[in-house]
């Protein structure tokens, strides 16, 4: 795995972090949480930009959003008591399958 993929995975993890930060900042009314959230947002974008120096746009952006969307939803189910019904889980599995597919097929080129 080259450094671009490492940056991309970290960017996706940061996206999960800032999504949670948005929840806990309560509309940016909590100053400390808000500042941390914005800092993590910026870090996520910087890491994504570094990954995009060598990775294709569609691959990098798709994986970044997939990690963020699936990761946030999964953690929301476990830590925020969000619904865990079968259809939600199946939809999350499709997102994960798409992310894996983008990774696999981008390496074949």
Image (cartoon, helix red, strand yellow):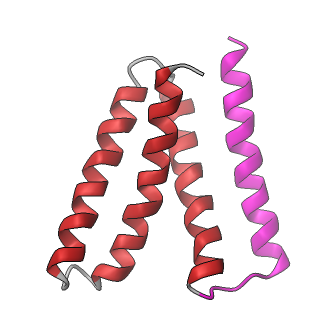
Percent of width and height locating residue 90? 82, 65
Q: What is the total number of numbered labels drawn onto the structure image?
A: 0
Residue 66 forms part of the magenta stretch: no
The magenta-colored residue range is 81-109
In the rendered image, the quadrant that contains the N terminus is top right
Percent of width and height locating residue 13? 48, 52
Measuring 73% from the left and 38% from the top, which residue is drawn there? 100
Q: Which of 52 and 5 is in front in this view?
A: 5
In the rendered image, the quadrant that contains the C terminus is top right
Left or right of 73? Residue 19 is: left
Judge whether 18 appears above or below 34 on screen.
above
Percent of width and height locating residue 79? 58, 81
Left or right of 88? Residue 77 is: left
Judge whether 85 appears above or below 48 on screen.
below
Q: Nearer the viewer, residue 74 or 60?
A: 74
Measuring 41% from the left and 26% from the top, which residue is drawn there? 52
Left or right of 68? Residue 73 is: right
Measuring 57% from the left and 41% from the top, which residue is drawn there? 63
Q: In which quarter of the image is residue 26?
A: bottom left
Task: Name the main secondary structure of what is drawn in magenta.
Answer: helix
Measuring 65% from the left and 79% from the top, which residue is drawn there? 77
Residue lying furthest left in this view? 31
Residue 100 forms part of the magenta stretch: yes
């Amino acid at each position: 795995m080259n450094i671009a993929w490492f940056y991309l995975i970290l960017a996706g993890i940061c996206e999960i972090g800032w999504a949670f930060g948005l929840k806990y900042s309560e509309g940016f009314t909590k100053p400390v949480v808000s500042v941390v959230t914005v800092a993590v947002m910026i870090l996520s974008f910087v890491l994504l930009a570094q990954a995009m120096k060598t990775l294709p746009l569609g691959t990098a952006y798709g994986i970044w959003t997939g990690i963020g969307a699936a990761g946030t939803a999964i953690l929301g189910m476990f830590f925020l008591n969000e619904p865990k019904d079968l259809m939600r889980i199946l939809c999350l599995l499709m997102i994960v399958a798409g992310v894996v597919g983008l990774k696999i097929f981008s390496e074949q080129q």
